[in-house]
Amino acid sequence: MEFQYASRASQGARSYQEDSAAVRAGADGEPATAAGAEGRATELTAALADGMGGHAGGALASGTACSTFLAAYGSSSGDVPARLDEALQLANQAIAAQVVENPSLNGMGCTLIGTTFSAPGIEWVSVGDSPLFLVRGGEIVLLNEDHSLAPEIDKLAAAGKISWEQAKSDPRRHFLRSALTGTDIDLTDRSHRPLALQTDDVVVLASDGIHTLDHTEILRVVLAYAAEGPDAIAEALIRTVEGVRDPFQDNTTVVAVVVR
């Protein structure tokens, strides 16, 4: 089983980029952090983070979290869930250390998805609202939990307490219930065993800028470009987000992984 990967990013309507992504191919490979990173491997570790706290703080938090996560996972031992948890905690501690060193950065933080791909399948840990999608057999599934207020607001709509129109336009939808800020992590989503992957599966890590597209549109784009590989998928997803021309478009970063 081989994992082919590619990463792409867009600033959207922002004047700065707070997203970061990093991929390590193989157990001993050097992390590739460029938004245009591409490659293939029989083992893969990937991290994606969406920063908050302004240009300097958000970019520093997301970059620190991704680089620390990959380094910590690579140097740790034990089973995969334990290594993922340790890497997550060390990423959070690294953000805390940055704030101690420069108190003006207080309040910065980020979401984080950390994933590992190997013969048994995919395993992950995540905090925040950056989605992790699996596309298989013409269907798309969100693998991780959304730690924003969006699911809670949608529950109100499902219960008939507010309309779906009110739910979808609620400005609080993107408020985070959990993030890496260097303090205690309120909510964490994790896999407890490998999710077996199949040939031609596509896994997409993304920052929340991808939410400009609904799941049906994300699926359409992935299926249209899956045969061309992860670089075509990642490029098409970013291009489709930009094509919406949302005047408030957030940064968008994607890492696409195709199983061959």
Image (cartoon, grey):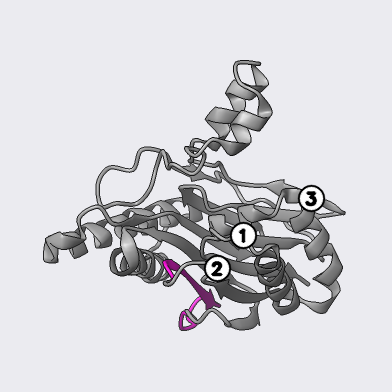
Graded by Cα atoms within 10 Å as few (under 14), some (14 to 19) or many (20 or more), the crowding at tag 3 reads few
Q: Which residue is mark 2?
A: 12
- Could you tell whether 105 is left or right of 49 in the image? left
Quadrant assignment, res 236: bottom right
Identified by mark 2, the residue type is Gly
- Give the extent of the magenta segment: 17-31
Q: Residue at x 66, y 58 (%)?
A: 121
Q: Which residue is mark 3?
A: 216
Quadrant assignment, res 4: bottom right
Graded by Cα atoms within 10 Å as few (under 14), some (14 to 19) or many (20 or more), the crowding at tag 1 reads few
- Depth order, front residue of 31/58: 58
Q: Residue at x 45, y 61 (%)?
A: 49
Q: Are marks 1 and 3 in contact (CB under 8 Å)?
A: no
Q: Are marks 1 and 2 in contact (CB under 8 Å)?
A: yes
Q: Is residue 257 above or below residue 120?
A: below
Residue 193 is situated, as x and y percent measured from the top left of the image, at 59, 47
- Could you tell whether 72 is left or right of 240 in the image? left
Kindly identify which numbered label has been placed on residue 21. none
Q: Residue at x 57, y 61 (%)?
A: 247
**Depth-wise, is mark 2 or mark 3 nearer the camera?**
2
Residue 165 is situated, as x and y percent measured from the top left of the image, at 66, 31
Q: Which residue is mark 1?
A: 246
Residue 76 is situated, as x and y percent measured from the top left of the image, at 37, 64
Q: Secondary structure at mark 1?
A: loop
**Depth-wise, is mark 1 or mark 3 nearer the camera?**
1
Question: Which quadrant does the N terminus fall into?
Answer: bottom right
Identified by mark 1, the residue type is Asp
First of labels 2, 3 by sequence position: 2
- Depth order, front residue of 102/68: 102
- Could you tell whether 27 is left or right of 176 in the image? right
Q: Is residue 139 magenta?
A: no
Graded by Cα atoms within 10 Å as few (under 14), some (14 to 19) or many (20 or more), the crowding at tag 2 reads many
